Amino acid sequence: MTVSHAHSHAPIDVHAHWYPRAFLDLLAREGAAHGLEWREVPGQGPQFKVGHLATGPVGPSYVDLDARLAAMDAQGVAMHALSVSQPMTYWAAPGYAERLSACYNDALAEAHARHPKRLVGLATLPMHAPDLALREVERCAKLVGVRGFYLATRINQRELSDPAFFPVYERIEALGLPIFLHPVMVIDAARLEKFYLTNLLGNPFESAIAAAHLIFGGVLDRFPRLDWVLPHAGGAFPWLVWRLRRGWQKRQDLPKLSRDPADYLTRFHYDTIGYSDHVTEFLVARVGAERVLMGSDYCFPIAYERPVEIVTAHPTLDAGQKRAIVEDNARRLLRV
């Protein structure tokens, strides 16, 4: 691998999706019994759908690690933090969801064992069955290469502030590992079906809704050492948090918090997937460069092709800020 960027010697991409072959095989074999529609697209790989959620075709770049490593080399990326994408596992009956999660997480450990300097994993959990999720957290604590956990911005129809999830958060906090969030189901999906709006607007609004529930639901106060990462540069949340503050100041029906809602901006980390230099500049100004992490959304159609240069070519960041975003923050958060 040749990484020649002056600002960093080992860039880490924290937003990189992967579908292991064993996980896809388990979906193909048993998913239909749980409502998953599956079809093979000739020459392109599988396509699957649950309700509004359509994924794929999942071609070789999503699955094949050698193809991924070659792409990383071409991008100058040293390491991927691998994560599942939709539909995750919450659509499946709990026992099957636990097996899907374990299958995925075991594949993460195998990928890390094969390429320990290049690949680490963000484990998935059957969060709609919190007792099973807690059991999988304990199992993942012993797997090599697991450096965090990956949750949806809501779990089916339950918000992340649901107390049923608190034992899971407590255990992850005790492990000192971060939680990365990603939208799966989006609000009012029927309105967003045209124009790819499910992704372009639905996903960023989902992140804002999840952040608001974590704040007003008291989760961030209850678990003060738990790190949370919001995708897509925080979505709409960093731009709307002052509107949340205004409501909190003026409305008696909002919870009494220990501090101003805007102060919770710095309880989250954010990736760089904002598609404009001014988005990154805004985040650095509001939360500090130490809370921004390089991401690409590999390898979806709207992913960054050159995620390192998005940071290293930024016109207003200094060399220290660039290095922090490209490598140092992720190294600290993921303990690599």
Image (cartoon, rainbow, N blue to C red):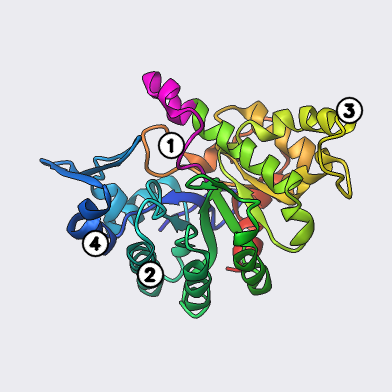
The total of numbered circles placed on residues is: 4
Mark pair 2, 4: CA separation: 11 Å
From the image, which quarter does the C terminus lie in? bottom right
Work out whether residue 130 or residue 212 is closer to the camera in this orientation and state it: 130
Mark pair 2, 1: CA separation: 27 Å
Which residue sits at x=60%, y=60%?
165
Residue corresponding to mark 3:
250
Question: Which of disc 1 and disc 2 is earlier in sequence?
Answer: 2
Q: Residue 26, which numbered label?
A: 4
Q: Residues within 10 Å of mark 4 (few under 14, many from 20)?
A: some
Question: In the image, is residue 191 above or below residue 209?
Answer: above
Q: Amino acid at mark 4?
A: Leu
| Mark 2 secondary-structure assignment | helix
- Residue 127 visible to an observer of this rendering: yes
Percent x, y of residue 305: 42, 37
Which residue sits at x=48%, y=53%?
3
Q: Amino acid at mark 3?
A: Lys
Q: Quadrant of residue 55?
A: top left
Q: Which residues are magenta?
A: 182-200
From the image, which quarter does the N terminus lie in? bottom left
| For discs 3 and 1, the disc positioned in front in the rendered view | 3
Within the magenta stretch, is there residue 186? yes
| Mark 4 secondary-structure assignment | helix
| For discs 2 and 1, the disc positioned in front in the rendered view | 2
Within the magenta stretch, is there residue 211? no
| Mark 1 secondary-structure assignment | loop
Disc 1 to disc 4: CB gap under 8 Å: no
Q: Amino acid at mark 1?
A: Ala
Question: In the image, is residue 54 above or below residue 334?
Answer: above
Question: Which of disc 4 and disc 2 is earlier in sequence?
Answer: 4
Mark pair 3, 1: CA separation: 40 Å
